[in-house]
Image: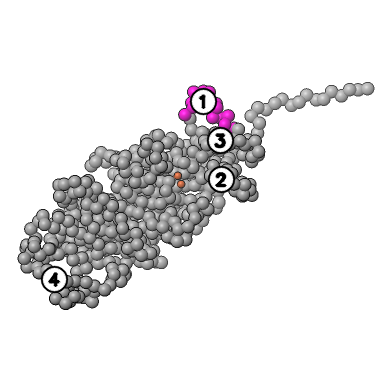
Amino acid sequence: MKKGTSSGHHANETEAVLKPSVKLKAEFNKKAAKPVSAGEILAPNAKRTLLPGKRYVLTAAQNNTEVNAGFLKALESYCKDNGAELLVSRFTYNKGGFDNSGQKDGELWYDPKLSKYICDKPMQIGKDLVFGGELDISPTASNPLSGFDNYFQGKSGVVPNPRVAMKSLPGLGEDNARFLYTTGAVTERNYIQKKAGQNAEFHHNYGALVVEVDENGHAFVRQLAADNSGMFQDLTNKYLPDGKIERNQPIEAITLGDIHVEKTDPVQDSVTFGKGGIMETLKPKYSFLQDIMDFTARNHHNMKDPFFWAEQKQKGNTVEGGFGTVAAWLKRHEQKGRQDIIVESNHDEAFDRWLKEQDVRFDPENARFWHEASAERYKQIESGQGDANIFEWAVRRAADLPNAVFLRENDSFIIGKNSEDGQGIECALHGHSGPNGARGSPKGFTQLATKANTGHTHTAGIIDGVYTAGVSGKLDMEYNKGPSSWSHSHVITYPNGKRAIITVKNGKWRADDKPHTAEAPLVPLIPKVEPSLKLPKPAPKLTVVK
Ligand SMILES: [Fe+2]
Ligand SMILES: [Fe+2]
């Protein structure tokens, strides 16, 4: 047979099956003949179709596997509720394990409930996202996103796969990080009971991605993570397996991207905390705040840089002023019903290091505060409270903060325990310290075999149960040069422990949001300076009368 005229996947044929793997191998279906040859000129990126809609829900389905009926029903009701279109990409696994002889055209069996949603083609959604519907990645792949860094060119990409994952990739310039996402699956668990299959069975997720495109063509993406019944929550709406919708549902927590308060990004801050913003909409019970203070004024990385010192002086940055900014930020953003949990982080710990290591005799801008904090530290130790948190002392002396809770590095704070796996999510790990004294990394934390919401890398991601937030502060912190994978991403945790990552971009956090503008700059709260002991007025000088 002549090359290019055979097996039905030539680019000129508009109805072409672009994923040949969903067809049976000839040995399993006598009616299907093997072609002699095949080939095509175009790469997948040349075959992408631009989808015209504004809302899509993307998921994946496995051959010879029942659909999770409750989840499909919940997704259908979600799509109706939100004016979204459901797209399901088929992937293949264990093709030889099932009888497909009754299938027409030699195709594998897929649950007919999904027929009208099948999309096995590459689809562009908005300006900056591609749904890789043509991809067929094994559900047992331990890292389904590996190898796809370039596949979607300069765009973000969606890989159909039941294992939930997300990866940030660097882009040139500011706020140009790209993301790779997997979808989760709408079909049940159906794995070969050997190592790879059994492990994948554990990581199988009933899930989908919602993509919202705004008027500028930018795509906002969130995970829709379902439980075994198929129920899932998206923001404050819960979609049930019987198709019902419950609105105004609570949000357990938000793990914000690292704060670095002296380097606040004023627009991002307004999207998160301003009128109509994330906090006002979601009203989470907890917010987890990491690297809340940048400790810009006297960070140990710059202690020997005289120009840096000069710059701090010129800008009026002091350590006490930094704490005053933390206090002012916490005070401004207090919300009734929400606890602000400050997770001990490496930038906060720089304060302790400064107290221990620096000679401040010739640092008049910071000397008094250094001595006060050091004295407090000694008082804590002498009164038997050597493990008290000096960082907490420095923030609380600047403002009354009844909603704030300060965690230490070895503390644990678990939320979202659910009845399905009995596991909750550890939220007290910033991410800078890894197991056995190693440097922390999201991959390293997967060894803990506990779900966790972390930060520190400023690079949002999901790897197995570890969700990493991005950064809330500026994307350009002066020390991070070159292409950047940083983004203004936050992790949302629902009461049942399911999670989603949202990303603020162009002053918005979702397509319908009105662009936010910067709020007024913070004024640091600094306690009045006065001597601690008021001495009696000096006695009048004796005047000698001659
Ligand atoms: Fe950090
Ligand atoms: Fe950080």
- Quadrant where the N terminus sits is bottom left
Q: Which residues are magenta?
A: 372-387
Kindly indicate the quadrant of the structure image that contains residue 95: bottom left
Q: Which residue is the site of mark 1?
A: 381
The numbered mark, 1 or 4, whose residue comes first in the sequence reads: 4
User: Disc 3 designates what residue?
Assistant: 357
From this view, report whether residue 248 is shown above or below residue 369. below
Q: Which residue is mark 4?
A: 35
Report the mark closest to the observer, 4 or 3: 4
Q: How many marks?
A: 4
Q: Position of residue 293 (x, y in %)?
A: 50, 43
Q: Classify residue 109 as left or right of residue 533.
A: left
Q: Sequence-wise, which precedes: disc 4 or disc 3? A: 4
- Check disc 2 and report the residue beneath it: 302
Q: Nearer the viewer, mark 1 or mark 3?
A: 3
Q: Secondary structure at mark 3?
A: helix
Disc 2 residue type (three-letter)? Asn
The three-letter code of the residue at mark 3 reads: Glu
**First in residue order: circle 2 vs circle 4:** 4
Q: CA distance from mark 1 to mark 3?
A: 18 Å
Callout in the foreground (1, 4) = 4
Task: Say few, some or many: other residues with alpha carbon within 10 Å of mark 1 (under 14 / 14 to 19 / 20 or more).
Answer: few
Q: Residue at x 51, y 39 (%)?
A: 350
